[in-house]
Protein backbone atom coordinates (compact mmCIF):
# COMPACT_ATOMS: atom_id res chain seq x y z
CA UNK A 1 0.00 0.00 0.00
CA UNK A 2 0.97 3.59 -0.53
CA UNK A 3 1.48 5.63 2.63
CA UNK A 4 -0.25 9.00 2.17
CA UNK A 5 0.70 10.14 5.68
CA UNK A 6 3.88 11.87 4.56
CA UNK A 7 2.36 13.71 1.60
CA UNK A 8 1.39 17.39 1.79
CA UNK A 9 -2.20 16.50 0.87
CA UNK A 10 -4.31 13.83 2.47
CA UNK A 11 -4.95 10.41 1.00
CA UNK A 12 -8.68 11.10 0.85
CA UNK A 13 -8.12 14.10 -1.39
CA UNK A 14 -5.89 12.10 -3.74
CA UNK A 15 -8.38 9.23 -3.91
CA UNK A 16 -11.18 11.75 -4.49
CA UNK A 17 -9.27 13.33 -7.38
CA UNK A 18 -8.56 9.92 -8.91
CA UNK A 19 -12.25 9.02 -8.56
CA UNK A 20 -13.32 12.35 -10.11
CA UNK A 21 -10.90 11.85 -13.01
CA UNK A 22 -12.21 8.33 -13.59
CA UNK A 23 -15.84 9.46 -13.54
CA UNK A 24 -14.98 12.33 -15.89
CA UNK A 25 -13.16 10.01 -18.30
CA UNK A 26 -15.76 7.24 -18.45
CA UNK A 27 -19.13 8.83 -17.66
CA UNK A 28 -19.29 12.61 -17.77
CA UNK A 29 -16.81 13.14 -20.64
CA UNK A 30 -18.58 10.89 -23.17
CA UNK A 31 -21.97 12.32 -22.14
CA UNK A 32 -20.76 15.90 -22.63
CA UNK A 33 -19.10 14.79 -25.89
CA UNK A 34 -22.37 13.36 -27.23
CA UNK A 35 -24.21 16.55 -26.37
CA UNK A 36 -21.49 18.70 -27.93
CA UNK A 37 -21.62 16.64 -31.13
CA UNK A 38 -25.42 16.87 -31.28
CA UNK A 39 -25.22 20.62 -30.76
CA UNK A 40 -22.72 20.93 -33.63
CA UNK A 41 -25.40 19.56 -36.04
CA UNK A 42 -23.14 16.66 -36.98
CA UNK A 43 -25.81 14.20 -38.22
CA UNK A 44 -26.99 16.57 -40.97
CA UNK A 45 -23.44 17.60 -41.88
CA UNK A 46 -22.37 13.97 -42.02
CA UNK A 47 -25.21 12.98 -44.35
CA UNK A 48 -24.35 15.92 -46.63
CA UNK A 49 -20.67 14.88 -46.66
CA UNK A 50 -21.54 11.29 -47.53
CA UNK A 51 -24.00 12.39 -50.23
CA UNK A 52 -21.36 14.65 -51.78
CA UNK A 53 -18.76 11.87 -51.68
CA UNK A 54 -21.13 9.42 -53.31
CA UNK A 55 -22.04 11.87 -56.06
CA UNK A 56 -18.34 12.59 -56.69
CA UNK A 57 -17.50 8.87 -56.85
CA UNK A 58 -20.44 8.14 -59.12
CA UNK A 59 -19.31 7.20 -62.62
CA UNK A 60 -20.33 9.49 -65.44
CA UNK A 61 -23.25 8.22 -67.49
CA UNK A 62 -22.09 6.38 -70.53
CA UNK A 63 -23.06 7.66 -73.92
CA UNK A 64 -25.37 5.41 -75.85
CA UNK A 65 -25.72 6.59 -79.42
CA UNK A 66 -29.17 6.81 -80.86
CA UNK A 67 -28.94 4.52 -83.83
CA UNK A 68 -32.17 4.25 -85.71
CA UNK A 69 -33.22 4.68 -89.30
CA UNK A 70 -33.49 8.48 -89.16
CA UNK A 71 -30.10 8.92 -87.51
CA UNK A 72 -28.38 6.71 -90.09
CA UNK A 73 -30.27 7.35 -93.32
CA UNK A 74 -31.31 10.86 -92.33
CA UNK A 75 -27.81 11.99 -93.23
CA UNK A 76 -28.70 11.30 -96.86
CA UNK A 77 -31.25 14.09 -96.78
CA UNK A 78 -34.89 13.95 -97.83
CA UNK A 79 -34.48 10.66 -99.70
CA UNK A 80 -33.14 8.91 -96.60
CA UNK A 81 -35.91 10.32 -94.42
CA UNK A 82 -38.47 9.21 -97.02
CA UNK A 83 -37.13 5.64 -96.89
CA UNK A 84 -37.42 5.68 -93.09
CA UNK A 85 -40.96 7.02 -93.14
CA UNK A 86 -41.94 4.50 -95.82
CA UNK A 87 -40.34 1.39 -94.26
CA UNK A 88 -40.11 2.37 -90.59
CA UNK A 89 -37.16 1.36 -88.45
CA UNK A 90 -36.02 -2.00 -89.83
CA UNK A 91 -34.53 -4.27 -87.17
CA UNK A 92 -32.17 -6.00 -89.57
CA UNK A 93 -29.94 -2.92 -89.81
CA UNK A 94 -28.78 -3.04 -86.18
CA UNK A 95 -30.16 -6.16 -84.48
CA UNK A 96 -28.23 -5.71 -81.21
CA UNK A 97 -29.23 -2.08 -80.64
CA UNK A 98 -32.13 -3.01 -78.34
CA UNK A 99 -29.84 -5.26 -76.31
CA UNK A 100 -27.31 -2.45 -75.93
CA UNK A 101 -29.99 -0.02 -74.73
CA UNK A 102 -31.40 -2.60 -72.31
CA UNK A 103 -27.92 -3.32 -70.94
CA UNK A 104 -27.28 0.40 -70.39
CA UNK A 105 -30.64 0.83 -68.63
CA UNK A 106 -29.93 -2.12 -66.32
CA UNK A 107 -26.47 -0.77 -65.58
CA UNK A 108 -27.85 2.69 -64.76
CA UNK A 109 -30.59 1.27 -62.54
CA UNK A 110 -28.00 -0.84 -60.68
CA UNK A 111 -25.88 2.28 -60.08
CA UNK A 112 -28.97 4.08 -58.73
CA UNK A 113 -29.71 1.17 -56.38
CA UNK A 114 -26.12 1.21 -55.10
CA UNK A 115 -26.33 4.94 -54.50
CA UNK A 116 -29.62 4.66 -52.61
CA UNK A 117 -28.23 1.78 -50.52
CA UNK A 118 -25.15 3.79 -49.62
CA UNK A 119 -27.31 6.80 -48.68
CA UNK A 120 -29.51 4.59 -46.51
CA UNK A 121 -26.40 3.38 -44.66
CA UNK A 122 -25.23 6.95 -43.99
CA UNK A 123 -26.63 6.91 -40.45
CA UNK A 124 -24.52 3.93 -39.45
CA UNK A 125 -21.35 5.57 -40.83
CA UNK A 126 -22.18 8.81 -39.00
CA UNK A 127 -22.80 6.91 -35.76
CA UNK A 128 -19.51 5.09 -36.27
CA UNK A 129 -17.67 8.41 -36.62
CA UNK A 130 -19.33 9.71 -33.44
CA UNK A 131 -18.44 6.58 -31.45
CA UNK A 132 -14.88 6.53 -32.75
CA UNK A 133 -14.35 10.19 -31.87
CA UNK A 134 -15.76 9.69 -28.37
CA UNK A 135 -13.50 6.68 -27.90
CA UNK A 136 -10.32 8.29 -29.26
CA UNK A 137 -10.81 11.65 -27.53
CA UNK A 138 -11.75 10.32 -24.09
CA UNK A 139 -9.06 12.25 -22.19
CA UNK A 140 -9.69 15.65 -23.86
CA UNK A 141 -13.41 15.14 -23.25
CA UNK A 142 -12.70 14.29 -19.61
CA UNK A 143 -10.67 17.50 -19.25
CA UNK A 144 -13.43 19.49 -20.97
CA UNK A 145 -16.16 18.01 -18.77
CA UNK A 146 -14.06 17.84 -15.57
CA UNK A 147 -13.24 21.54 -15.70
CA UNK A 148 -16.88 22.49 -16.27
CA UNK A 149 -16.00 23.47 -19.86
CA UNK A 150 -13.55 26.14 -18.73
CA UNK A 151 -10.61 24.39 -20.38
CA UNK A 152 -11.30 23.40 -24.00
CA UNK A 153 -8.61 21.19 -25.55
CA UNK A 154 -7.88 21.83 -29.26
CA UNK A 155 -9.36 18.49 -30.32
CA UNK A 156 -12.66 19.50 -28.72
CA UNK A 157 -12.56 23.00 -30.23
CA UNK A 158 -12.21 21.34 -33.63
CA UNK A 159 -14.68 18.54 -32.98
CA UNK A 160 -16.09 18.69 -36.52
CA UNK A 161 -12.70 18.04 -38.09
CA UNK A 162 -12.21 15.16 -35.64
CA UNK A 163 -15.56 13.73 -36.72
CA UNK A 164 -14.74 14.07 -40.43
CA UNK A 165 -11.40 12.33 -39.84
CA UNK A 166 -13.18 9.54 -38.02
CA UNK A 167 -15.70 9.26 -40.86
CA UNK A 168 -12.84 8.82 -43.36
CA UNK A 169 -11.01 6.33 -41.15
CA UNK A 170 -10.86 2.70 -42.29
CA UNK A 171 -13.15 1.61 -39.44
CA UNK A 172 -16.03 3.80 -40.60
CA UNK A 173 -15.27 3.92 -44.33
CA UNK A 174 -15.49 0.13 -44.45
CA UNK A 175 -19.27 0.45 -44.17
CA UNK A 176 -19.56 1.79 -47.72
Image: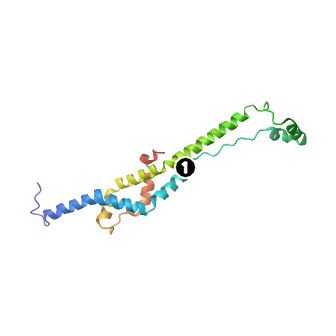
Q: Tell me the colour scheme of the image.
A: rainbow
Q: Is residue 87 above or below residue 158?
A: above
Residue 50: x and y in percent read 51, 52
Asked whether, in this view, residue 80 is left or right of residue 32, the answer is right
Asked whether, in this view, residue 91 is left or right of residue 9, the answer is right
Asked whether, in this view, residue 161 is left or right of residue 139, the answer is right
The residue positioned 34% from the left and 62% from the top of the image is 32
Local crowd size for mark 1, using a 10 Å CA cut-off: few (<14), some (14–19), many (≥20)? some
The residue positioned 75% from the left and 41% from the top of the image is 66
The residue nearer to you, when weighing 157 against 120, is 120
Q: Is residue 19 above or below residue 80?
A: below
Q: Residue furthest right?
A: 79
Image quadrant for the N terminus?
A: bottom left
Q: Quadrant of residue 39?
A: bottom left
Q: How many marks?
A: 1
Secondary structure state at the residue bearing disc 1: helix
Residue 76: x and y in percent read 87, 40
The residue nearer to you, when weighing 34 against 65, is 34
Residue 158 in view (yes/no): no
Residue 160 in view (yes/no): yes
Residue 100: x and y in percent read 69, 35
Which residue is disc 1 drawn over? 54
The residue positioned 69% from the left and 38% from the top of the image is 101
Asked whether, in this view, residue 100 is left or right of residue 169, the answer is right
The residue nearer to you, when weighing 109 against 15, is 109
Q: Is residue 40 above or below residue 72?
A: below
Amino acid sequence: MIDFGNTPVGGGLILGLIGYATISAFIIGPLVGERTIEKSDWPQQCKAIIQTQLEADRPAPEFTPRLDCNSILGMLGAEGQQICSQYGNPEFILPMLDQLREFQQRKNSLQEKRLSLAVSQANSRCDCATSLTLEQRRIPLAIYAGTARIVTPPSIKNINSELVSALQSPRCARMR
